Amino acid sequence: MTKLLSLLSLLLLLLVLVPLSSQSTIAGNPPSAAHTELTNYGFPIGLLPASVVNYNLNQTSGDFSVNFGGSCKITLPPDNYLATYSKKVTGKIVAGRIAELDGIRVWAFFKWWSITGIRSSGEDLVFEVGMVTAKYPSKNFLESPQCEGKHSAS
């Protein structure tokens, strides 16, 4: 009987701890309101750097702006593409889709390319660069990256 109680106690403890450990955090801190808003629309918090200063979202139209206090660069998983975020990123968000995106660029094939949209497709994210798309697993974006430094891309 004591073994059964011990087993039940262990299972109860696991049921309590697993959901807590699966919540994403940013450098040990809870996610910002902007990061939380991303999850409300079906996206992982790792699409935004950790350095969000503030954001605005029109709940009716989906128009948003995210301010970082300065531009920054990060390395995007899994292929280690260098990306730059402008001081202000704007776009339109609805469930599973970010469109009219402005302010995020990625260095590939010896050129800077603007990411114009992001779609959530099951377990994957589809990044749009004009008419070209690239698909990556959402699990690569569960943690919000820290800016690697100030960068001015033109």
Image: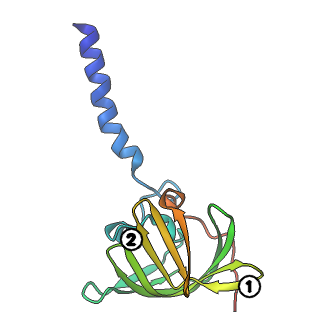
Task: Mark 2 or mark 1: name the one nearer the start of the chain.
Answer: 2
SS state under label 1: strand
Marking on residue 1: none
Residue, x 43% and y 55% (percent of image)? 24
Q: In which quarter of the image is residue 147?
A: bottom right
Identity, as a three-letter code, of the amino acid under mark 2: Leu
Residue, x 37% and y 81% (percent of image)? 93
Q: In which quarter of the image is residue 59?
A: bottom left
Marking on residue 111: 1
Q: Nearer the viewer, residue 28 or 48?
A: 48
Q: How is the image coloured?
A: rainbow
Crowding near the residue tagged with mark 1, few <14, some 14–19, many ≥20 C-alpha atoms within 10 Å: few
Q: Nearer the viewer, residue 66 or 138?
A: 138
Camera-side mark, 2 or 1: 1
Left or right for 50, reference 61: right
The single residue placed furthest to the bottom in the displayed view is 154
Pinpoint residue 36: horizontal percent, then vertical percent: 37, 67
Residue, x 46% and y 56% (percent of image)? 25
Q: Is residue 78 above or below residue 33?
A: above
Q: Is label 2 in contact with label 1 (beta carbons under 8 Å)?
A: no
Pinpoint residue 39: horizontal percent, then vertical percent: 36, 66
Name the residue beneath numbered marker 2.
Answer: 38
Identity, as a three-letter code, of the amino acid under mark 1: Lys
Pinpoint residue 118: horizontal percent, then vertical percent: 47, 76
Q: Nearer the viewer, residue 29 or 120?
A: 120
The single residue placed furthest to the right in the displayed view is 110
Left or right for 65, reference 105: left
SS state under label 2: helix
Pinpoint residue 37: horizontal percent, then vertical percent: 35, 71
